[in-house]
Amino acid sequence: MADRRLQVFHTVARLLSFTKAAEELHMTQPAVTFQVRQLEEQFNTRLFDRTHNRISLTDAGKRVYDCAERIFELYAEMDNSVRELTGDISGVLILGASTTVAEYMLPALLGDFKDKNPEVTIRLKVANTDGIVSMVENNSIDLGVVEAPVNNKNLVVEKCRMDQLVVIVPPNHVLTSETSISLEKLIQHPFICREEGSGTREVMIEHMNDEGLNTNDLNVAMELGSLEAIKGAVEAGMGVSILSRATISKELKLGSLVAINLDPPINRPFSFVHQKQKFRVRAMEELLSFARNYCEEHKNDEVALSYNSVS
């Protein structure tokens, strides 16, 4: 409902990039530039300084940006107030999830949510934990679900289920006789690792540091960005790895992989993360409420998100 020129300006100002704003708004860069220039013509002043392929807000631009923030907050308050009165829940929600969560945690929850709220359109972006947190910081997604701790104190973090990490090996591996294994013993074997920025990798390295182990001693045979690729490489005998137990239920049933507990155990939270806006779109409020209720009802299910607020 807000002035399209103001929306485009606000996105450019938030990202400090015409290119990134065009991608986020699904517009061409010339169209974004045109909208900003129209707003500058309306105020008869420059809103951005453009130097050496970098942009920054002018003093006028900073004032417009601050006012735009308040305008959009008022629009959200108005929209939520009317929708609460009418009971209407609709709109578009943009979610971001790290790979493990997107592939193994969200499908059941979002499927049930859509059944009850068919007028809500959900778009899902998948990236590693660092990427999802960055999207939340830049307001390019409404809600993120990640698999590693979030250090940005300006974001709201709400813990979901606790996840257990386990060692995976092929059925004929020498370690299958072990009921549990330490990281110190594990790093003696060829290891298939997730890419940098992965929540699984960050948690593993954090625990290695806690145990006084040198991460340079990790015998990395391969570094892969796909869970399925890692499982396939382990099944082929190319190394061992550490993954969420929730991601290997099919392989355990088929007998193509063996899971070994870590000693000491490594647990990590799956968490919702979002901005601290006072007023969010009603569809997002409904999704968060639905997630809490859904998780409470399915708290004993292996793949259900169990909810515990830590904001």
Image (spheres, rainbow, N blue to C red):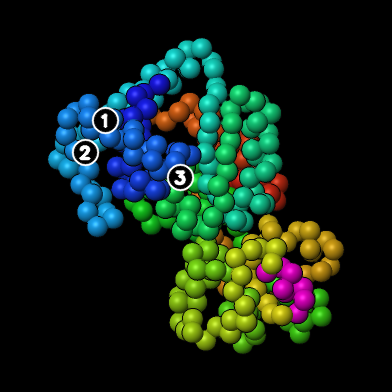
Identify the element where label 3 is drawn: helix
Asked if the residue at tag 2 contacts the one at tag 1, i.e. Cβ–Cβ closer than 8 Å, the answer is yes
Q: Position of residue 254 (x, y in %)?
A: 85, 63
Examine the rendering and report whether any part of residue 146 can be seen: yes
| Residue named by callout 2 | 47
CA gap, disc 3 to disc 2? Answer: 21 Å
Earlier residue among tags 1 and 2: 1
Say if the magenta span includes residue 232.
yes
Residue shown at 34%/33% (left/top)?
A: 35
Examine the rendering and report whether any part of residue 261 can be seen: no
Mark linked to residue 307: none
CA gap, disc 1 to disc 2? Answer: 8 Å
In this picture, residue 8 sits left or right of residue 63: right
User: Which residue occupies the extreme top position in the image?
Assistant: 86
- Check the picture and name the quadrant holding the C terminus: top left
| Residue named by callout 1 | 39
User: Which of the two residues, 44 or 165, is positioned nearer the viewer here?
Assistant: 44
Residue shown at 40%/48% (left/top)?
A: 20
| Residue named by callout 3 | 23
Identify the element where label 1 is drawn: helix
What's under tag 2, amino acid-wise?
Leu
- Check the picture and name the quadrant holding the N terminus: top left
Q: Which residues are magenta?
A: 230-237
